[in-house]
Amino acid sequence: MAAPIRLLVNPAAGGGRAARVAPVAEEALRALGLTVQRSDTRSLDHARELAREAAHAGETVVGVSGDGLLGALADELRGHPGSVLGIVPGGRGNDFARVLGIPNDAHAAATIIADGHVQSVDLGIVQAGDAEPRAFVGIASAGFDSDANRIANEAPPWLGGLVYAYGALRALAAWRPARFEIELDPPGERHAVVGYSVGAANSKAYGGGMKAAPGAMLDDGLLEVMVLGDVSKWAFLTRILPRVFKGTHVEEPEVSVFRAREVVLSADRPFAMYADGDPIGDLPLRVIAAQAAISVLTPRTPPPDSAFARAAVAGEA
């Protein structure tokens, strides 16, 4: 018999979208023969408490929200071997669901949960000073992205998915280049660059479909580290930013891409690193790839642009 479902809902996510999606998902899961208990979250800390309670009870945790809640749930569940995370997209960006091939339609997402196909997924782990390590599912970045994320989080909810473009444009107006230093292990390289941002990617996308790290995979135990060097604001706006949506920005000479299990990042002025849309630690800090850290319910057939390296290889065999 399938494990009972604990549906954790952030009713404020997506400007209220999660609250509208949750009853549809709950009804669909019950119609598929699953036992469902719904709990609404008041904060990320409250979500962690609920996930911990569900894991101890042997329930499958299903997040109805965007990437912020999913990152918090994954962070909690990585400490509970045997726990499983399901996803019903309910946020504005839903990038983690997108790269996993989970559709926005609540009925279709419920069918994937009921099907019960479990996939091991990597996480990124941020260690900042003496703070507790924090996990994320998508992309952690700092610099220009710190400003853009902060502005996006303060934007009015009616902007919907446009909030990310709004944040980037607002941040660009006041941006001045920063000097970043990164140390990659392996291969034990150090780099210094003046520019816009440094990102450590566990997954391919952020910001509502921006393929910031098109080569990132969720099952290779590595981070895709992207560095955007110094370009004029006009070049950023007309040449770099439009290409991020297709992932072709990595072909530009100002963009450098590295792969490593760990990266240490610092800058010449204070920045908060953001991951899954929320602040996760202040620079300087370390980001570590944690291979097969959690189990996630995913489609049995990976999408064409699969986030899974081994699944893609198996599909070509």
Image (spheres, grey):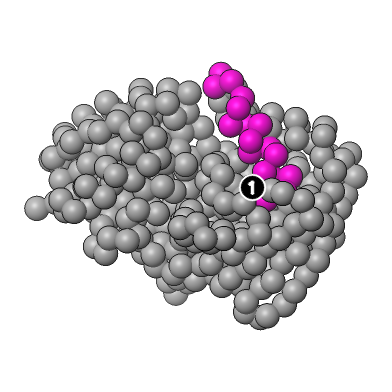
Q: What secondary structure is the stretch in magenta mostly built from?
A: helix
* 160 displayed left or right of 174: left
Q: Which residue is mark 1?
A: 272
Residue lying farthest to the front in this orientation: 130
- Residue 147 visible to an observer of this rendering: yes
Picture coordinates of residue 279, whole percent (x, y): 56, 44
Instruction: State which quadrant residue 156 falls in.
Output: top right
Residue lying at 70% horizontally and 56% vertically, measured from the top left: 198
- Figure check: 268 above or below 146: below
Give SS at disc 1: strand
> Is 44 in the magenta?
no
Residue lying at 44% horizontally and 30% vertically, measured from the top left: 13
Picture coordinates of residue 61, whole percent (x, y): 27, 47
- Residue 251 visible to an observer of this rendering: no
54, 301: nearer the viewer: 54
- Figure check: 274 above or below 252: above
Picture coordinates of residue 139, whole percent (x, y): 57, 53
Mark 1 is on which residue type? Ala
Query: Which stretch is magenta?
Result: 142-158
